[in-house]
Image (spheres, helix red, strand yellow):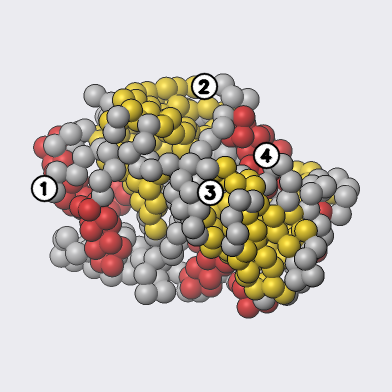
Amino acid sequence: MNKICKLATIGLLVPIVCCCATVLLAEDPHTTRELVCGPFIGHVEATRVRVWARFANPGIYQLSVAGNSRRVQATACAAHDLCVVWDLEGLRPDQKYSYAIRSETGAVLAGGADYYFRTAKQHDADMDLRLFFGSCALEDEGTAAVWQQAARQRVDVTVLLGDTPYIDSVDLDIQRRRYAQFASVAQMEKLFRSTPWYGTWDDHDFGLGDGDGRLVGKQRSRQAFMEYHANPSYGEDDRGIYTSFRRGPVEVFLLDTRYFAATESSPFVLHHASLLGRAQWDWLRAGLKRSTAPVKVLACGMIWNAATRPNKLDQWGTYAHEREALFRFIGEQQVDGVVLVGGDIHRSRVLRHDTKAWAGYDIYELISSPLHGNVIASANAPHPRLLKDMGTPHAFMLLEVEQRDGNVTQLQARFLDAAGRQHYRISLLD
């Protein structure tokens, strides 16, 4: 398995073939063969950062940051597939930091002008924020062009909504191999070495197309996900992968709509199955109640409505009783600024749900898919609240937020493709 990752660093252009698509991976002159995947910037706050990487050999590796005296060590071992995460604290808000990675001998394995991150501003500071959302990616040239376009758009945060990558197995070796292949795409490596990224899973990276929580072996999928992501957290009590993060006026709740689905009764309606499970529901409701962010994004792999290709039941419409309970909770607790985000269906869409009677306001749903080029025509299903449907390959969404004097003065979604063409724009401020 290590050989697959090493292909990115041997100084030649080498093809990796996956899902009938080929992308060329090239060596970065500022890394060595000992560092085979990454580094990627993970969760970032005003005073701390998480950095992920994968190595060729076991050992102790060091992360150092210019302008900060602390040097953090992490151990790569076979038990975690030679993946490491460094947690560095004591940083200053809204500062650009260059970083370097060294081996036990002191040899520099990664460093240079492209290896940097910027800590977050204080939540109430003036800012223009740009968050990237996308789903369904391959290791092909079309998806690689999306990563390049995201860099040109100067996104502040990237959020991957699942099927990133396609795995379709709960075998731990296969899970790890596919994540390693995905993490070796040169264009993605270049983007994530300086741009924070977060992720959740959908069915194919969970382990089975249209799979739910009854999937045998899902704990192995969770292990591989944790090894290859530097999210702020991964569910609770060794179950699930849900998490949240705040960036300025936006708090993103990354939901897990696979691990618990159909494994227990809904806490809202007797004799109905739950999608999120009681523990995740308790976590989400508590998080929404205490959140002070003006914008609250609820993001997951699947879509929040039932309008998609025939016989596809892994969507929130199948669990409409839980979606309605969420809307009622939003209204009862006066939770403002909620936006729904999903992926999965190989089309990008915008809906405005008629939720005033429950939530007190209409709630937008934004669907961003696919990052690769495989659009599904039959997913263009009618819905009475559909505002826009786009069968656009290599598509992604930017959620753009402007905050001035503690107030959100602009909130818009823009749907673009790998060439930077804008296919739709909508303001989410009434």
Asked whether residue 304 is in view, the answer is: no
Q: Is residue 59 left or right of residue 29?
A: left
Tell me the residue that label 3 is attached to: 197
Quarter of the C terminus within the rendering: top left
- At label 2, counting other C-alpha atoms closer than 10 Å, the crowd grade (few under 14, some 14-19, many 20 or more) is some
Percent x, y of residue 34: 79, 63
Mark 1–mark 2 CB contact (< 8 Å): no
376 and 258: which is toward the camera: 258
3D distance between C-alphas at marks 1 and 2: 37 Å
Tell me the residue that label 4 is attached to: 144
| Number of the front mark, 4 or 3 | 3
Percent x, y of residue 106: 77, 66
3D distance between C-alphas at marks 2 and 4: 18 Å
User: Which mark sits nearer the N-terminus, 4 or 1?
Assistant: 4
User: Which mark sits nearer the N-terminus, 2 or 3?
Assistant: 3
- At label 3, counting other C-alpha atoms closer than 10 Å, the crowd grade (few under 14, some 14-19, many 20 or more) is many
Three-letter amino acid code at the position of disc 4: Ala
Asked whether residue 93 is in view, the answer is: yes
Tell me the residue that label 2 is attached to: 422
117 and 343: which is toward the camera: 117
Quarter-wise, where is residue 1 in the image? bottom right
Three-letter amino acid code at the position of disc 3: Trp
Mark 4–mark 3 CB contact (< 8 Å): no
Q: Look at 41% across and 74% down and name the residue there.
A: 238
Q: Look at 57% across and 39% down and name the residue there.
A: 371
State the SS at label 4: helix
User: Which mark sits nearer the N-terminus, 3 or 1?
Assistant: 3
Q: Look at 53% across and 48% down and name the residue there.
A: 197
